[in-house]
Amino acid sequence: MMLKNPILNKCLILISTLLVIFIFLEIISNAVEKKYFFDTTVYVQKAKPILHKISNIPGLSYELIPNVSIESGFYSINSKGIRDREFEIPKPEGVFRIIVLGDSVTFGTEYPAALTYPKILEKLLNAKTESNIRYEVLNAGVCSYNAVQKFLLLKHKLLDYEPDMIIVQFLNDDYYRNAVFLPGFENSNQKDVFLTMGKYFSFNFPQILALPHSIDRLLMRHLASYRVMNKRLYDRLSLSDPDRFPAQAYKFAAYKNMEESMKVNKEVFEKFHELSVKFNFQISLLLVPELKDDSGIDQWIKNDCPKKYGFSSIDLKQAFNTRGVNLESLRIIPEGTCHLNDKGHRITAQIIKKRLEKDIQY
């Protein structure tokens, strides 16, 4: 039944039309989204979410909160957002500075910072009394970072340190999709959590449009059409400004095509190489195996990558075997697969030191 007021009738028709268009867009957007993404269950690591924040760097997803200290200083983050002390900028004369990029293996979740292999390495290198060089080894490990995220951390936050060498700690899971950040889980005992695309993107997709942050995140969480629009806008920005908006960065933990994730995480090593040439630092790959005898590092990163880009490489599995060290003896817990115990951190530092004595170019 039509109302007698023609203006009101037009308003109702307009509202009804817009509602139908909106519902249609949501249906189409949901179909488009489900073609590439899926709701998923993710494993929640004991990565101290209270130490992390959503990053405004596209593709990074999350980062450590600068200048935060918790648990009576057991975890202390410096002003650049790494688990280490402050370092002088610009770099002083006579200092050889090494940045170790890594994930939770490097961060050393279970140990004080001084007992992680980067800091043990620093102590070992400076024990050379005959050298006039002072070594600084920076622990830039962030839990769950993949190869792309390690690169973005270096490029956007750490180059001011003027590194002479970058050590890239690598596990096979560095090829995986970007890790997720879940605010509010620091007090949760959950090991797994079901994550919808709306919840995931509201936490991990960078804000592009100039809306109030709370509104942008609300729309991102609940409207598939808004997510699809933002993703398409991001793709256009990545074509015109790939340095600021890395291509494929929205293909996070729930992207269906794992091969695409592996491809992107391999291609990033070319960018590592380009950065090393531009800023004149050396790169060494630290290849960390799963702590079981039948595990092995991916052959591309082990053989092809170092040859292609001129990186040095340290194969920890081979080095452990040469020393007669049983991999399982390096586990923190019996069922652990990659986190090193205190013995593992010490031996790893010793292995790196021995190799760097050959590789370091002054």
Image (tube, rainbow, N blue to C red):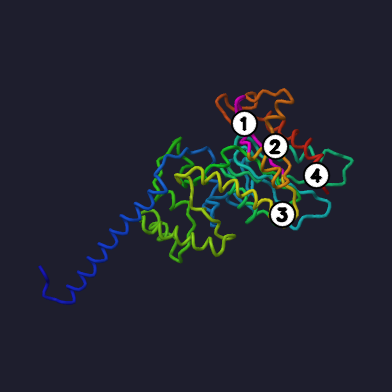
Estimate the spatial distance between the alpha carbons at disc 2 and disc 3, rounded to whole Å.
Answer: 20 Å
- Badge 2: few (under 14), some or many (20 or more) residues near its Cα, within 10 Å? many
Mark 1 vs mark 3: which is more N-terminal? 3
Estimate the spatial distance between the alpha carbons at disc 3 and disc 4, rounded to whole Å.
Answer: 18 Å
Estimate the spatial distance between the alpha carbons at disc 2 and disc 4, rounded to whole Å.
Answer: 18 Å
Mark 2 vs mark 4: which is more N-terminal? 2
Mark 3 vs mark 4: which is more N-terminal? 3
Estimate the spatial distance between the alpha carbons at disc 4 and disc 1, rounded to whole Å.
Answer: 27 Å
Give amino acid for label 3.
Tyr
Give amino acid for label 1.
Gly
Q: Which residues are magenta?
A: 284-299
Residue 268 location (% of width, % of height): 61, 50
Give amino acid for label 4.
Ile
Q: Is residue 221 left or right of residue 75?
A: left
Q: Which residue is mark 4?
A: 360
Q: Which residue is mark 2?
A: 117
Q: Nearer the viewer, mark 2 or mark 4?
A: 4
Q: Badges 2 and 4: C-beta atoms under 8 Å apart? A: no
Q: Which residue is mark 1?
A: 296
Residue drawn at 61 percent across, 36 percent down: 298
Mark 2 vs mark 3: which is more N-terminal? 2
Q: Is residue 119 magenta?
A: no
Residue 206 location (% of width, % of height): 49, 57
Question: Could you say whether the residue bearing mark 1 is in a helix, strand or loop?
Answer: loop
